[in-house]
Image (spheres, grey):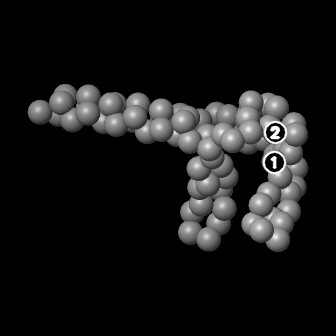
Amino acid sequence: MFHHIKPQIWGVTTVGERGQIVIPVKAREALNLQKGEQLVMISKGDKFIGFVKANELTSILKSWIDEIEVYKKEDN
């Protein structure tokens, strides 16, 4: 699905005392991130991968479920 998209590195951030991080301005603008928007943090084992907008991830997962159901019906 996203294999052809080149990853974008937006900069480096530091985890603060309370575990907070600051997302660089250029990334917030490019991704249209708004104050209060929910992000899902994704990792693989102890390796951090990134954040995904919660509403976008929900939409992607629903479309995958719908697609799987179509394939299941075709199999029967």
In the rendered image, the quadrant that contains the C terminus is: top left
> Which label is found at residue 27?
2
User: On the rendered structure, is 11 left or right of 74?
Assistant: right
Question: Mark 1 = which residue?
Answer: 23
* Residue plotted at (33% across, 31% down): 66
Instruction: Identify the secondary structure beneath mark 1.
Output: loop
Residue 2 percent location from the top left of the image: 59, 35
Residue 12 percent location from the top left of the image: 87, 55
Taking the view exactly as shown, the residue that stands out farthest to the left is 76
Would you identify the image quadrant in which residue 26 lies? top right
Residue 10 percent location from the top left of the image: 84, 44
* Residue plotted at (82% across, 71% down): 17
Residue 40 percent location from the top left of the image: 59, 50
> As rendered, which of 33 and 26 lies closer to the eye?
33
Task: Say what amino acid the circle numbered 1 marks.
Answer: Ile
75 w.r.t. 39: above or below = above
